[in-house]
Amino acid sequence: MRARLAATGAACHLCGKAVDYTLPSSDPMSFVVDHVTAIARGGRDDITNAASAHRICNSRRGARDHDNTVRRSGSLDR
């Protein structure tokens, strides 16, 4: 799933900013796979429930619903 998402080069689905897929995993702006609907809230662990995110954005979101954390960059309005 990780390689498949990285191959898309998608922006962070939480903040809308570009993800640098080459950053080391310890970097707060590095790529992580985010479960759109958290596993803790009944989300599936498959590609249909996965999106690219920055480590820091995913960490701040936790298991809350996505609607509560979208930053208004406008990139998700298209």
Image: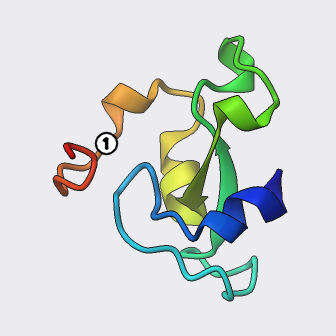
In the image shown, does 23 or 51 lie closer to the viewer?
51
Please state the total of marks drawn on the protein image: 1
Can you give x and y, in whole percent of width and height, for residue 58 in the image? 56, 51
Identify which amino acid the numbered label 1 is placed on.
Val
Position of 31 compared to 19: left or right?
right
> Mark 1 packing: few (<14 Cα in 10 Å), some, or many (20+)?
some
Quick check: 62 above or below 43? below
Q: Report helix, strand or loop for mark 1.
A: loop
Left or right: 19 as drawn, with respect to 42: left
Q: Residue at x 58, y 74 (%)?
A: 28
x, y percent for residue 39: 74, 23
Q: Residue at the location (25% across, 49% down)?
A: 71
* Residue 25 to residue 3: above or below: below
Query: In this picture, is 15 found above or below 42?
Result: below
- At 49% across and 49% down in the image, what residue appears? 60
Task: Name the side, left or right, on which 16 lies relative to 19.
Answer: left
Q: Position of residue 48 (x, y in %)?
A: 68, 31
Tell me residue 31's x, y (percent).
65, 68
Q: Residue at x 60, y 63 (%)?
A: 55
Residue at mark 1: 70
Residue 54: quarter of image: bottom right
| Of 37 and 64, the residue lying toward us | 37
